[in-house]
Amino acid sequence: MLSLARVVILTALPLLAGRYMAEQREHLRRERALIAEQERLRERLRIAHDMHDSLGHLLSLVSVQAAALEVGPLPPDQQRAVSGLADTARAAAAELHEVVNALRNNDAPGLDDIGGLVARSRAAGAAVTIETSGETVPLTDPKASHAAYRVVQEGLTNAVKHASGAPITVSVDWQPDALLISVANPMPRRPPSSAGGGSGLHGLTERVAAGGGLLHVHPGPREFRLVAMLPLVPVIAGATP
C-alpha cells in the first residue's frame, strides 16, 4: 500500500509541477503582453497630443488667415484661390481631428461615424445630403467599415476642394451581399488640377481593397461620382458551409 502511494506521488508530482510551470509561463506571457499594450497606448496618446498641439495650431493659423482674406476686397481670381485655400485648410483640420481621435480612442472611425462626418461637413458650410436604402446590416470586418468611412471622407474632401459650394450627395445602399457607398457632386466648370490629385484616390483604392471591396471613379460630363462596393459577409479561407 505504501509502495502504491509512493508511485502515485512520484507520478503526480511531475505532472502538477509541469502544470504549475505552464500556468506560470502563461501568466508571464499575458503580463508581458499587457505591459506592451500599455506602452503602445501611451505612445499613441503621446503622438496624438503632439499632433494636436503642433499641426493643430498651424492649421488654425492658416484657417484664420484664409478666412480674413476671404472677406477682403480681392479680384475674382484671387478670391476663388483664397476660398479654395480656406476650404483646404478646413478639410485638413477635420482630417487631423479624425486622426487624433482615432489615436486617442484606439479605434479607427467606421461606418457608424459617417453621420458625424456629414454633420461636420454641413457645419463647415458644405451642402451635403445623405441618402440610405436597403436593410441595414453591420459590417463585420473592421477594415471594410473603416474603408466605408474613408470613401465618404475622400469624396467630401474632393467635392469641397474642386466644386466648392456645389451640392454633394452621399448614398449608402444596402444590397443583399454588398454595401454600395457613393459620393457625387456636379463637375466644376474648370477641370481640377492633376498635380498630386491621384495620391488620395490611390491610397483609398488600396484601403478599400484591404476591406475586400472595389473602388470606382466616374468622372462624367456633368457629375463626378466616387463609388465603393464592400462585401457584407467576408469570405473566410477554409470555411465550411
Image: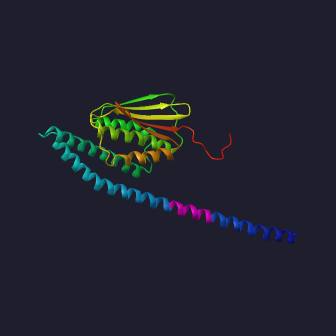
Depth check: give the residue in front, 105 or 9.
Answer: 105
Q: Magenta-highlighted stretch: main secondary structure? A: helix
The answer to whether residue 147 is left or right of residue 238 is left
Q: Quadrant of residue 40?
A: bottom left
Above or below, comparing residue 179 to residue 62 in the picture: above
* Residue 57 drawn at (x, y percent): 25, 53
Q: Quadrant of residue 116?
A: top left
Depth check: give the residue in front, 170 or 28.
Answer: 170
Q: Can you name the residue that lies furthest to the right here?
A: 1
Q: Is residue 32 magenta?
A: yes
- At a point 83% along the width and 70% down the height, the residue shown is 7
Depth check: give the residue in front, 88 or 56.
Answer: 88
Write the start and end of the magenta stretch as one range: 25-34
- At a point 52% along the width and 29% down the height, the residue shown is 135
Q: Can you name the residue that lies furthest to the left here?
A: 73
Q: Is residue 93 magenta?
A: no
* Residue 71 drawn at (x, y percent): 15, 39
* Residue 127 drawn at (x, y percent): 30, 32
- At a point 44% along the width and 29% down the height, the residue shown is 132
The answer to whether residue 109 is left or right of residue 75 is right
**Colour convention of the picture:** rainbow
